[in-house]
Image (tube, coloured by chain):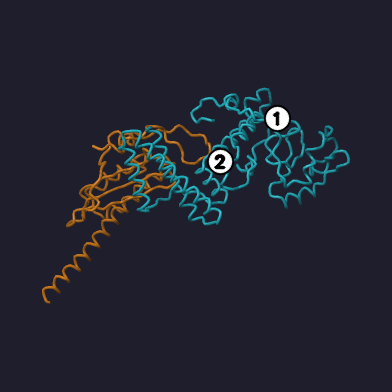
Amino acid sequence: MLKKNSTRCTLFTILRHTTPSVPKHHSPLTFSSHSNNHFLHTSSPPPPFSPKGRSFHNPTWFYSFGYLTFDGKRLCSKSAESVKARSSRCWNCHESTAAAPFLVCDSCRCIQPVDDSIDYFEIFGLEKKYDIEGVNLEGKYKDWQKKLHPDLVHSKSQKERDFSAEQSARVIDAYRTLSKPLSRAIYMMKLDGLEVDEEQTISDPELLAEIMEIREAVEEATESESLKKILSRMEENLKSWSNTFATAFQSRNFEEAKDSIRRMTYYSRVIDEVVKKL
Amino acid sequence: MLRVAAKRLFVTPSPAPQQAIRVLPRFYHERVVDHYNNPRNVGSFDKNDPTVGTGLVGAPACGDVMKLQIKVDEKTGKIVDARFKTFGCGSAIASSSVATEWVKGKQMEEVLSIKNTEIAKHLSLPPVKLHCSMLAEDAIKAAVKDYEAKRAKATTANGEETTTGEKAATA
């Protein structure tokens, strides 16, 4: 498990905890919405493409795989229909692919520059929803790091090493954000344009008085027994407000969603303090 | 003395946002450290005391809570004493500590004009911690508001008592 305090986050330390079920060669994440464009992957690698004497204004026109001539126009219309289909081109071998997320080129295995339009859910091949029970986030995270980690690119160009550092960091961010319910909730709101206002102060007397009481109890607690009781209570609260958030967000009730996030933040703070004390 | 506020880990403040951004080396200003090591006015008054106004505010973004209480002289309207209890970062604790120091000896109307920018300047708060001083300003305002509300309730209650008293006398 990735620890925040580890000084060196090498590929080795990440994979040291690999479960035996993880396959050696991870097949690229593809979405079922690609039907026409999917054949790009199933065909054998195309002959090396030489750009002599051709203009680059519309590069998608020139790719052909045997009898399959790629129509740029068709690709555009397909992108308009399917949400996740993007026409991406490898900077190294100029292979075009509509697979998402496009972090590594499948033909030449070159790491691509960071594309901020790919959100964290897409990186892990997940639907944009709050409940991710049963998703093997850690497994997918490790699979990505096997392809992107800076430890793998020592012999590659500076450009690719930079891409590797950025992509790897982004995947780490994505993993951390999505693995905890509170950060996942805040991220989902952010994707919908609802950012948490740092400046805002609240004076909800009921909530604040409750938190005040709990924090004081934590301060004054001397034995770990009482602290553990408080901890379990807080974790219960967190779970229940997490569910409240899920329903509120689903029904687009953003006020209630924001309120749930507020409470989750407060309870998480208490949990942090108790853990520190224990 | 209850060193509630003093029980905070002395670490460089990390920014609230979740994304990994490069953190420039930042240090607590010596005034902030001073307020942390030598907290002034930590504690509570009795909430039900009619001369006490309690301001309870929170910053949901970082999960801070701040309680600021003022003791007011009824005749002169001057704040004679103040106490605070804050659960939050060093900057939040220092801001509320400074707030309690500044309100002492002032008139209630006067303290309403204390601005968060003044507190921030006094403590040399970095931009990422400005909301802590905002919290302190809101706490002062909330405490004054609470006191006035209490007083208003008390005077109406007194008014009712005297009228019922008169009624009883005339009956």
Q: Residue A56 versus residue B88: which sits nearer the camera?
A: B88
How many labels were placed on the picture?
A: 2
Judging from the image, mark 2 belongs to the subunit labelled A
Tell which residue pokes out farthest to the right in this image: A67
* Residue A177 in which image quadrant: top right
Tell me the residue at 54%/45% (across/down).
Answer: A187
Task: Give me the chain that's orange.
Answer: B
Tell me the residue at 42%/37% (across/down).
Answer: A272
Q: Name the amino acid, label 1.
A: His
* Residue A50 in which image quadrant: top right
Q: Does residue A234 appear left or right of residue A168 in this picture?
A: left
Other residues around mark 1 within 10 Å, as few (<14) / some (14–19) / many (≥20) = few
Task: Give me the chain that's cyan.
Answer: A
Tell which residue pokes out farthest to the left in this image: B169
Tell which residue pokes out farthest to the top in this image: A155
Q: Does residue A117 appear left or right of residue A194 in this picture?
A: right
Q: Residue A62 versus residue A266: which sits nearer the camera?
A: A266
**Residue B26 seen:** yes
* Residue B129 in which image quadrant: top left
Residue tagged 2: A178
Residue tagged 1: A25
